[in-house]
Amino acid sequence: QVQLVESGGGLVQAGGSLRLSCAASGRTFRRYAMGWFRQAPGKEREFVAAISWSGVNIDYADSVKGRFTISRDKGENMVYLQMNSLKPEDTAVYYCAALPVFSTDYERTYRYYGLYDNWGQGTQVTVSS
């Protein structure tokens, strides 16, 4: 298991920016594909962004494409989500997730939350209009 801790959430006005961080600890010697998901009150958890273990391949939900940027620093065991041009509909709890992968899957990204077996506690992002 790997432990994940998110930080960087908060209250921001529409059009503003936030940078979320996810710190991984524990079995970090394993290879993990990483993802960011979010869940708004009364809604299902939804995919936001994913990055492969290699860092080469990245995937975004259409709703955040062009505004959000996912990145990772494997040396520091960190994953980031830079969020720009925030909208009120981005308001949600944001979760970092990790999926262990084998060498054949180092370039893959994963959108389905059910595949991830390591989750952080979440960080609240609130965007006011």
Image: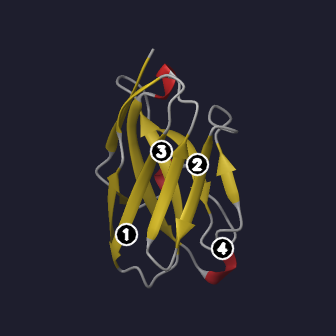
Which mark sits nearer the N-terminus, 2 or 3? 3
Name the residue tied to disc 1: 24
Query: What distance separates the C-alpha of mark 3 from that of mark 4?
Result: 20 Å
Name the residue tied to disc 3: 37
The answer to whether any part of residue 47 appears in the image is yes
Q: Is residue 120 above or below residue 14?
A: below
Which mark sits nearer the N-terminus, 1 or 2? 1
**Residue that appears at 54% across and 25% down:** 15
Per the rendering, the mark at residue 119 is none
Name the residue tied to disc 2: 49
Label 4 element class: helix
Label 3 element class: strand
Q: Nearer the viewer, residue 1 or 125?
A: 125
Residue at the top extreme, as displayed: 129
* Residue type highlighted by circle 2: Ala
Query: What distance separates the C-alpha of mark 4 from that of mark 2?
Result: 17 Å
Q: Is residue 22 left or right of residue 101?
A: left
Q: Position of residue 30 (x, y in %)?
A: 46, 82
Quick check: marks 3 and 4 in contact, CB under 8 Å? no
The answer to whether any part of residue 1 appears in the image is no
Which mark sits nearer the N-terminus, 3 or 4? 3
* Residue type highlighted by circle 3: Phe
Of tags 4 and 2, the one toward the viewer is 2
Name the residue tied to disc 4: 105
Q: Is residue 92 above or below residue 78?
A: above
Quick check: marks 1 and 2 in contact, CB under 8 Å? no
Quick check: marks 4 and 2 in contact, CB under 8 Å? no
Where the N terminus falls, by quadrant? bottom left
* Residue type highlighted by circle 1: Ala
